[in-house]
Structure formats: structure tokens, C-alpha cells
Amino acid sequence: MDQFLSNIGLLFEFPIVNLKIIIDGLMIGALFALAAYGLALVWGVMNVKNLAQGDFVIAGGYVAWYLSRHGMPPLLGVPVAFVVMWGVGWVVYRLVISRVIERDLFTSLLATFGLAIIMAQMLNLLFGSDTQSIQLDYDTLYFFDFIDIPIAKLLGVLMATALAVAVVLFMKKSRMGQAIRATSQDARAARVLGIDTEKVYSFTFSLNSAICGAAGAIIVMVWVIQPFYGITYSIRSFVIVTAAGLGNLPGVIAAGLGIGVAEQYGAHIFGIGYQQAIAVLLLLLVLVYRLVQQRRVRQSLK
Amino acid sequence: MKKTLFYAVLLLITIAAPYLFPDYGTQLATLWLMIIVALTWDMTGGQMGYNSLGNIFFYGTGMYVAALITIGMVHPIGEYTDASRSELMLFTEGQYFTGLIVGSLGAGLFCALSAVIIGYITFGLRGPYFAIGTLGVAIAAGELVSNWDWVGGGQGIQLPVYPGDLDTGKVVFYFLFAITGVALFIFLKWLYSTRFGAAINAIRDDEEKAEAMGIHTMRYKLTAWALSAFFVGVAGGISAFQLIHFEPLETAYQTINLGIFMVVCVLLGGKGTLWGPVVGAILFHVIKEVTWNYLLGWQWVALGALIVVTVVYFQDGIMGWLMHNKPEWFGMRVEKKEQEGTA
């Protein structure tokens, strides 16, 4: 307890520590937001709650890590992971997801939970259970003699932003993006108007998987991955989507950055051992908050 | 008459099993554990329509509460769980058995109470949010306990070994699980035939209408979850003594092992039926042990695939399939007449 208090005291004594924590949190949060955006996409378009979301992220990370160990330039890992995970997503869609779209809510949750177990274990068997990362030999920038930002992390954030912008533009401008948005609004009407919803579904899920893969490829360059880290990323995605709501892009970004910062503060105050617990507790907090909100709505309706 | 005979034979098999297959004592005990958790999951998941992914919370909490009660009655807990000292602390035979019984029952009561508290918060969540919320509770509990040094932290807790012959110990644990399981089965058989059973089925079918008919849905939901938590807690308490040593993430709050297995057992056997969870648990346990033995390394992938296949292709389960194809076995004549009429 004293430890926690002294950690909190540190924040007030040296305000610049806050700045460092916030910058770190925003960087991580950008990647969380990316994975959460994919979750919201799939959730909104085909009503599938993908509990294997985090495992797609980790799988993408392993693709980049494996290829970079075999002589590929690390930065190339991001587009390659995007393409490879697109393929994986398509296969997963054909085998499993396409069969749970029309089913009840719990089915997709449980089926993807089974999927998460399979993916985590396959990664474990293929690459071992050690934590892995790609070391980039870039410098570290220093501001005010205290804030250190490794250029690798900065690059990661830039790539995440570029990817996010590209995806958003794609959804806004392209025919396929329009079809996806139409399907998420009303699948039946979209079908009537001649949109091949089956194609939209498989495209959406593959796109989600690819976004996750690219996010994972960035994560492996700036932090570490491990086969069983997936579930935490899934839970973070759920926290973000639940907090922001579906189809609310600014909300997803804000919630993603927010949870990144909150986790960094939590890790600073309570110690790194609590990081997973904090992610989960945030989920519970968000759920309870939503519940209270709903009750208020219901009461006002009465 | 036929039914009485059927149950008598089953009971006889239950009693004779550990003596017939002495090498599989622990396996059979685990089988009963699976049956217990599957039956309790079905109470809320199958009969009431609230699919929890976090029932493992009660298992883990049951383990910890039973262990802490046992230790706390004899030694100061903080000193005991300090790993360097635990070997010095001994238990007499009397203390061990008192701890086993009082601890397990206490664990059950504690879990029932915590189910009411957690349920009060989470039962407002519907559909997938309830599943994710309860999963969150279980994961959070595991993470918090593994950071809590007073209860042993990530190292877990070491309980005393069964005093006396170890083979007798195995049989004793088998019967503890078996008695809990049989008691649970009889209890559920009675419970599902009462108004209470009808009420929770009504909640599953349409909660708004059930409420409109004057059923206090919240009260029923809390009671049902508390009852199921009680039995899981007791089973967890017994498990703690059977395993001797347990730690928070892999053993107690094993979200991806037992936590998901219990759901798969129920789906495999048939949701919302009395026999489904039992049949499913037996089948799943056999499949699990076979894959564990013959697919070394790939067993988890195989089990994950089993989960996906069960959920996607075979969600009605064995009992559901039987009911659909052999309705006359369940005394459902109406359906048969209709078929004859149309033929």
C-alpha cells in the first residue's frame, strides 16, 4: 500500500513523469484502437463478436517476426503481415465465421473463443512460448533531457495512423466500403439492392484480420509478443468497443488512446504485474457504467 | 419400475467404479468434477438462458476459501503462505478432516454469497455482454489473486497431503466428488420439476413476458446462480485438497481449461436437459483424455477444434439430437402422431 502511495506521490513531485506516461500510453493506445476498430467493424457488419481478435494481432506479430529473422527488412513486415493475415482471415471466415453469422449471440462468442485457443496453441507449437520482439537499430529521441521516445515507437505510431487513415478513406470512398456500410445498416435491404452480402461478409472479416495482423506487426517492433498474450488484446478491444459503441470512429480512437494511458498509469502505480488485471477491470467498469446508463434511460421512460 | 432399476444400476456402477478401476481413481474423480461443473453451468446457461463464461470464478474462489479456512483454523495465514516457512507448519489428522469438510462447505456458502453480489451487478447485462462480463470477473479475480501475497501470490498455496494411505485417499476424494455430484443431480431433478424450474425456463424463453407475468426475475436469477455457485464452490474446495498444491492462474481460475470445458460439455450433451450435461461431461472427458495421450503437443489444438465444431455444427447436443430423432424415448407421443398424420 505504501508502495502505491509513494508511486502516486512521485507523479505529483515530478509532473514531467506524467508527460512520459501519457506519451507512452497514447502510442500503445493507437494500436489498441486499430484492433478495436476491426472488432467494431466485424461486430457492426455481421454481428459476430470475435473473441479471437487478439490472437489475430499476435499471429500477425509472429508473421513479421519470423520473416524478419529470415532476412526480411523489419519495416516490410507490416504490409506482409497485412497480406498474410488477410489470407488467414479468409480461411477462418470460410471454415467457421460464415456458419455463425445468422446464429445467436453466444454462438459466435464461443466459437471464436475456441478459435482463440486453437490459434494461441498453434503459435505456441510453431514458435515456442518465449516472448519475442524485433530489435530495430534506430536512435532514441530525447526531449527536455527526460522524455525519451525511441524512433522505432514513433515509426510504429506513424504506420498505425497511416493504416487507420487508409482504412477510413477506403470505407468512405470505395464501392466496397460503401457496400460494407450499407450491409451494416440493413443487410436485407442491401441484398435487395443487389449487394452480394456474402462477399461483403468475407471481405469484412478478412479486412479485420489483416488490420489486426498489421497492428501485430507493429507491436512486435516496439514491444514484445507471446502466444498467450492474445486474450488481453481481445479484452482491450472489447473494452474500447463497449465504451465507444459501434460505428463511432472518433469514440473508438478516443477510447483506445484513453485505455492506453489508463493502463500506463495503472502499471506505474500498481506495478507491471497488474497490467492484465487493469485491462479487465476497466472492462467491468465500462460494463457497469453502461448498465447504470441504461437503467437511467429505463427509469426516465417509466 | 424400469427407471428405478436404471438408477439402481447407475448407483451401483458409481459405487463400484473406484474398486473396479483402481488405476484410474483420480481420473474418475475428475470425471465427477466435470459432471458437477457441467450440471451447474446448465442451471443458468441451459435452463435460464444466461450464458456465463465466468463460472470458473466460483471454482477458483472455492479452492482458495476452503484452503484459507483450513489453514486459518490452525495457523496464521500470512506466515503459512510465506513459501519459505510453510514446511514447518503441520496439521493433525483431525484438523485435516475438519478443514476438508468445514472448508468445502464454507467455500460453497462463500461462493453462493459472492454469486448474489456479482449477479446483482452482472444480471443487468444481457446476451453477449453477460458472457463477456462474467469472463472478465473470472480473469480479473485470477490476476488479482496472483498479485495478493497474503494468499500466496503467484506461487499459490500448498495444502497438507492426505493423512494415511494415499490409495485410500484417492478413493475418499472420488467419493467426495461422487456424493456431491449425486446430491446435485437429485437436487436438480427435483428442482426442475418445481415452480422454480418453470420460472427459470420462463426467463430463458422470454424474460420481459416472465416479468410481466409477475415473476420477480432478478430474485430467481440470483437464487439460481447462487445455488449453482454453491455446488461449484464445494467442488472447488474438494479439488484444493485433492490437488494439494494449486496456483491462481493455471489451476484455480483456469479460464481456458475447465472454464470453457464446462460449457462445451453442456453443448455436447445437450443444453437445457437434465441428462445432457452428464452425458456430455463423460464424452468430453473421454475425448480429452484420449487426445491428451495420443496427440501429445497438439491436444489443445484438437480440443479447440472440438469446441468450434461442437458450437458451429452440433449445438443441440446429443440429447437434443435424440429428442429430435427418437421422441418416443422421452414419452413425447404428440410429435409422432403428427408425423403419422402427414404421412
Image (cartoon, rainbow, N blue to C red):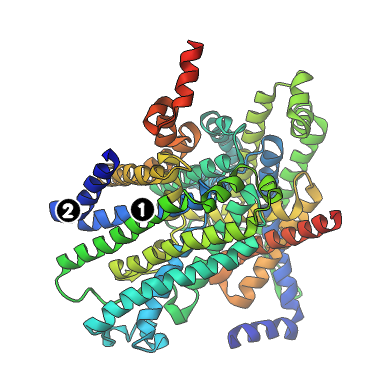
Residue closer to the observer: B117 or B25: B117
Q: Is residue B108 above or below residue A3?
A: above
Give the answer, above or below, for where B182 lies relative to B298. Answer: below
Chain of the residue under the numbered disc 1 shown in the image? B
**Mark 1 neighbour class, 10 Å CA radius: few under 14, some 14 to 19, many 20 or more:** many
Q: Position of residue A266 (x, y in %)?
A: 64, 72
Return the mark for residue B16.
2
Rounded to the nearest whole Å, what is the CA distance between mark 2 and mark 1? 19 Å
Task: Work out which residue is located at the far front of the displayed protein and give it.
Answer: B1
The amino acid type of the residue labelled 2 equals Ala
Q: Secondary structure at mark 1?
A: helix
Who is closer to the viewer here, A194 or B171? B171
Identify the image quadrant of residue B329.
top left
In front of the other: B292 or B269: B269
Residue at the outermost top position: B343
What is the x, y in percent for residue A261? 70, 65
Structural crowding at the residue carrying mark 2, measured as other residues with C-alpha within 10 Å and reported as few (<14), some (14–19) or many (≥20): few
* Marker disc for residue A20: none
B198 or B54, nearer to the observer: B198
Q: Position of residue A193 (x, y in %)?
A: 79, 19
Q: How far across and how far down the image is residue A86, in percent?
A: 59, 34
Please tell me which of labels 2 and 1 falls first in the chain: 2
Identified by mark 1, the residue type is Met
- Residue at x-position 47% and y-position 57%: B255
With B230 as the anchor, is B27 left or right in this view?
left
Tag 1 residue: B34
